[in-house]
Image (cartoon, rainbow, N blue to C red):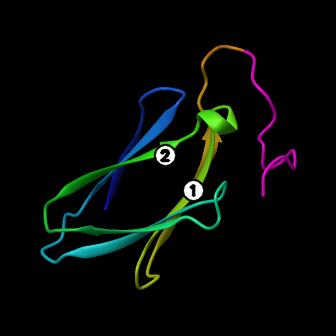
């Protein structure tokens, strides 16, 4: 279901999810930097959805999980968008968030 991740800019991370099945699928997106925010995304057969995550407030760091509504799979992604400039420690590791 997850086709790939595209970095648009330091301000946002674009996640592209494609449903390649013949049934509507529900996926859950949970951001570690905002534990209260959980998005349930309905994706129709052969449909692609693009989700944008705001990462400017966390200096380009991202940490999120994607799973299906029935918990048959889960993918976790974490990292930093390299802008070739000086950055800070991951805010979650540094204790600034959460």
What residue do we see at 47% from left, 82% from top?
Answer: 71
The relative height of residue 7 versus residue 31 in the rendered view (above or below) is above
Callout 2: 10 Å neighbours few (<14), some, many (20+)?
Answer: some
Kindly identify which residue carries mark 2.
53
Query: Spatial distance from mark 2 to mark 1, Cα to Cα?
Result: 9 Å
Residues marked 2 and 1 touching at CB (< 8 Å): yes
Q: Secondary structure at mark 1?
A: strand
In the rendered image, residue 10, in percent from the top left (x then y), is placed at 54, 27
In the rendered image, residue 21, in percent from the top left (x then y), is placed at 18, 71
Q: Which residues are magenta?
A: 86-98
Kindly identify which residue carries mark 1.
64
What residue do we see at 65% from left, 59% from top?
Answer: 32
Front label number (2 vs 1) = 2
Q: Quadrant of the C terminus?
A: bottom right
In the picture, measured across the screen, residue 47 lies left or right of residue 71, that is left
The relative height of residue 17 versus residue 24 in the rendered view (above or below) is above
In the rendered image, residue 12, in percent from the top left (x then y), is placed at 48, 36
Q: Secondary structure at mark 2?
A: strand
* Image quadrant in which you'd find residue 30: bottom right
């Amino acid at each position: 279901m997850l086709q790939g991740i595209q970095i648009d800019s330091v301000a946002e991370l674009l996640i592209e999810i494609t449903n390649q099945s013949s049934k509507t699928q529900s996926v859950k997106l949970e951001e570690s930097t905002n534990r209260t925010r959980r998005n349930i995304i309905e994706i129709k057969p052969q449909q692609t959805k693009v989700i944008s995550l705001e990462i400017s407030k966390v200096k380009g760091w991202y940490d999120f999980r994607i799973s299906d509504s029935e918990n048959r799979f889960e993918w976790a992604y974490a990292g930093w968008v390299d802008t070739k400039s000086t950055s800070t420690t991951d805010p979650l590791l540094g204790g600034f968030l959460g």
